[in-house]
Image (cartoon, rainbow, N blue to C red):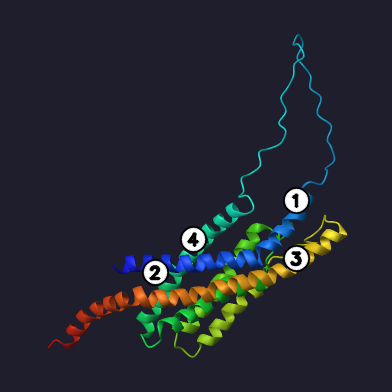
Amino acid sequence: MIFQRLIWAALATAVVVGSLQTGVQRWQAAPLILAAEVYEEQKAEAPKPAEAPAAHVHAAGTAPHEHEHPQGAAKEWEPANGAERTGWSWVANMLHAFSMALLLFAVMGIWLYRRGTALASLRLAGVVAAAGWLSFHLWPSLGLHAEVPGMEAAPLQARQLWWVLAVASASGACAVAGFSRASWRWLVAAALLALPFVVGAPKLQGDALAGFGPEAHAALEQLGTQFIWATTWVSLTFWVSLGLAGGWAFQRWVRPALLAALQRADAPAAVAVQAPQ
């Protein structure tokens, strides 16, 4: 029963949050991405030095013949601009919102089990969503800024490892601060938050826009700054809407069943304690 309610609540939250996220992306981030892709395509179409074809020698007694040469590798599939691209973005945003809603509900359930039911669902969802925004966006983005198409960056594996470290450190700091009651929890949380920056985020050695002309370089630099702010607003609206919609769905479908299950689990223990020895 709880599992079914959890899935339906996460799906309802995902529909609301994913749809809102798609609209915000189309308004804030998509125009910047499309504008940067124009310069990226121009860079890709720049002429390259032609290489002389290697001489082909026929074996003795073999008549000359024609050879088929490929005209280029097949282009990888990508959604066309317009409705197709928006539709696939909506699907991706729905899946992302569904997974984050499950994570939100899991943390809220652990809070109710460990800290009691004094905090209302909507307020609790807001606190957890704020921790999610800090862990999954703000803290990693302080070391690794969002990049528009065409910009070079540090090696992918190094960036992925540092991103995981930043997310794990921020999540651990939030968990220690929220669930622990010890006096040293703030010191541990501060140390965890500082850890990824002590290690240091990977940086590109050189100009991220090398290879572009002065006009394209200036335009992409401006688009990059705007894109950082746009992704910040997109992420902020995602977690705010997740806290609101997820808090309502948790209160409506999940919390009653969860509290009933916790009461049933506590009842045998209470009877055992009250039984005469």
SS for dot 4:
helix
Q: Mark 1 and mark 2: span between their CA atoms?
A: 42 Å
Which residue, as the protein is rendered here, is positioned at the far top?
A: 61
SS for dot 3:
helix
Using the image, tell me which numbered label, if any, was put on residue 41. Answer: 1
Which residue, as the protein is rendered here, is positioned at the far front?
A: 83
The x and y percentages for residue 13 are 45, 69
Three-letter code, disc 4: Leu
The x and y percentages for residue 67 are 73, 22
Q: Counting residues from the N terminus, which is met first, the one under dot 1 or under dot 2?
A: 2
Q: Counting residues from the N terminus, which is met first, the one under dot 3 or under dot 1?
A: 1
Q: Mark 1 and mark 4: span between their CA atoms?
A: 29 Å
Is any part of residue 109 visible from this angle? no
- Above or below, comparing residue 14 to residue 244 in the picture: above
Q: Counting residues from the N terminus, which is met first, the one under dot 2 or under dot 3?
A: 2
Is any part of residue 15 visible from this angle? yes
Three-letter code, disc 2: Ala
SS for dot 1:
helix
Q: Which residue has dot 3 on it?
A: 223
The x and y percentages for residue 24 are 60, 68
Nearer to me, 185 or 4: 4
Residue at screen point 39% across, 69% down: 9
Q: Which residue has dot 2 on it?
A: 9
Q: Which residue has dot 4 on it?
A: 95
